[in-house]
Image (spheres, grey):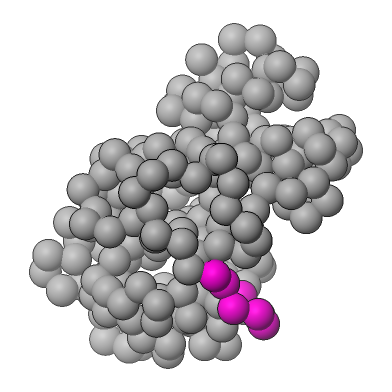
């Protein structure tokens, strides 16, 4: 799931200290870092469910399906319906993700189970499902401190065994940037953060 990095439409919670254009540039860097990890993992198909138009940040080898309108639970379900399954879904808020983490999520599907990676703010950053199922997302309150817990409970209620993935920090505000770049894997995001002066020199290296 991704939103085209257009100034004023993405990462507005980074403003201030960023300008809308700087926030969009950080969003593009985060998206590019994320797509690098997806490109390097063992998935047989790579799909971007996109809100907006593709740009030069989209590498070759990715299919693009447009996001539908409506609340986020509906958009998630529609993206899965377009892609089918089994698969792993992530967003563009965790540019520190690695191909290894995605491969671990894919491996959880070998036994027919699901996987969920919780985010430090109470949401989730990744979900692995054996098939598209609109019941997984319908009515789950999104972007709250209890979204991850509600999603986990829903998966279990639907009969899934759920493998845990590591908890990651989402890039929501500038205060999140040091933690997001600490591992050194969010290369573009960290470099741009240092250039913009919102990440200390040497951090995220």
Give whichever of 83, 99 is nearer the camera.
83
Q: In the rendering, at what x and y percent does residue 74 appear?
A: 56, 83
**13 sits to left or right of 180:** right
Above or below for 114 versus 106: below
Quadrant of res 197 = top right
Q: Main secondary structure of the magenta part?
A: loop
Q: Residue furthest left?
A: 111
Q: In the rendering, at what x and y percent does residue 154 appear?
A: 42, 83
Give whichever of 200, 187 is nearer the camera.
187
Q: In the rendering, at what x and y percent does residue 203 appear?
A: 59, 16
The residue at 44%/49% (across/down) is 167
Q: What residue range appears in magenta?
A: 66-72
Quadrant of res 180 = top right
Above or below for 32 versus 55: above
**9 sits to left or right of 181:** right
The residue at 43%/28% (across/down) is 185
Above or below for 83 versus 110: below
The residue at 37%/40% (across/down) is 37
Residue 69 within the segment the image draws in magenta: yes
Residue 6 within the segment the image draws in magenta: no
Q: Is residue 199 visible?
A: yes
Q: In the rendering, at what x and y percent does residue 187 appear?
A: 50, 25
Q: How many marks?
A: 0
The residue at 34%/49% (across/down) is 61
**29 sits to left or right of 126:** right
Above or below for 14 versus 190: below
Q: Is residue 164 visible?
A: no
Q: Residue furthest top?
A: 202
Quadrant of res 121 = bottom right
């Amino acid at each position: 799931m991704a939103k085209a990095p257009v100034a004023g439409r993405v990462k507005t919670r980074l403003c201030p200290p960023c300008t809308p254009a700087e926030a969009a540039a950080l969003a593009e860097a985060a998206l590019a870092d994320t797509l690098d990890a997806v490109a390097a993992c063992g998935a047989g198909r790579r799909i971007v469910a996109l809100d907006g138009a593709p740009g030069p940040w989209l590498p070759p080898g990715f299919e693009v399906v447009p996001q539908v309108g409506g609340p986020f639970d509906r958009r998630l379900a529609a993206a899965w319906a377009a892609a089918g399954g089994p698969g792993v879904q992530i967003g563009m808020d965790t540019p520190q993700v690695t191909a290894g983490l995605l491969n671990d999520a894919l491996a959880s599907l070998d036994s027919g189970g699901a996987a969920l990676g919780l985010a430090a703010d109470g949401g989730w950053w990744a979900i692995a499902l054996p098939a598209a199922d609109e019941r997984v997302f319908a009515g789950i309150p999104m972007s709250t401190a209890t979204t991850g817990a509600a999603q986990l409970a829903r998966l279990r209620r639907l009969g899934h065994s759920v493998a845990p993935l590591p908890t990651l920090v989402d890039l929501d505000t500038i205060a999140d940037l040091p933690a997001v770049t600490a591992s050194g894997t969010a290369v573009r995001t960290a470099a741009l953060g240092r250039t913009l002066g919102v990440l200390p020199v040497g951090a995220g290296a």
